[in-house]
Amino acid sequence: PPVPLAPSARAERKDKLSIADVAKVHAFFYDNGAVSPCTRDRVRRRVGPNLWQLAQALVAMQTMDALFSQFQTENVLCGTALSYSSFKKLAPWNLRRINRETCLCRTCELYKCYHDAMDTVPAIFSLPDATPAASPAAEAPAAAPALPVADA
């Protein structure tokens, strides 16, 4: 029999995730994140020369640590353990993290500024607290100490 010159097929890695597990991770990110409704929040990535892929930003409201621990409690993968680094690598490419939990549109920002200003107005125009005097003797100035008299 002739000897085959082609290399033999490689064995499949034991830590390889199935396509279903990768889909679970993506679905988890989309369920626990928010797709930005603002048209200015489009993100893009280069997929080739003069080729760009556009998508709306997927905003993560929690840290990656919190998302990973929540994923571990909610999902049990098909016989493979998902590490934290693999979880981060499987995150969608359009995932963006925010530092605030509020909307960043102009209307919401102006409302927040107006609200903060209205909180400071009473402090500006308030009168100092008038406490009633306990007794007239308390208001009288203290007597000056007696000075020593020098003998002449």
Image (cartoon, helix red, strand yellow):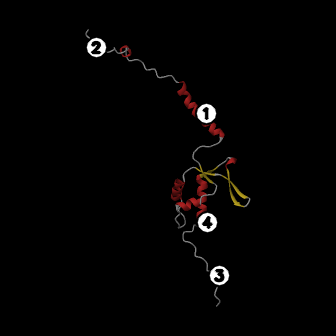
Q: Earlier in the sequence, mark 3 or mark 2?
A: 3
x, y percent for residue 17: 57, 67
What residue is pinned by disc 1? 114
x, y percent for residue 51: 73, 59
Q: Could you tell me the amino acid type at mark 2? A: Pro
Residues tagged 1 and 2 counted as in contact (Cβ below 8 A)? no
Tag 1 secondary structure? helix
Say left or right for 74 vs 2: left
Q: Where on the picture, by quarter, is residue 142? A: top left
Disc 4 versus disc 3: nearer the observer: 3
Q: Which mark is residue 148?
A: 2
Distance from the alpha carbon under mark 4 to that under mark 1: 50 Å
Q: Earlier in the sequence, mark 4 or mark 1?
A: 4
Distance from the alpha carbon under mark 4 to that under mark 2: 100 Å
Disc 3 versus disc 2: nearer the observer: 2
Q: Which mark is residue 48?
A: none
What residue is pinned by disc 4? 19
What residue is pinned by disc 3? 6
Disc 4 versus disc 1: nearer the observer: 1
The answer to which of 72 and 111 lies nearer the viewer is: 111
84, above or below 63, in the image: below
Q: Where on the picture, by quarter, is residue 95? A: bottom right
Disc 1 versus disc 3: nearer the observer: 3
Distance from the alpha carbon under mark 1 to that under mark 3: 73 Å
Tag 4 secondary structure? helix
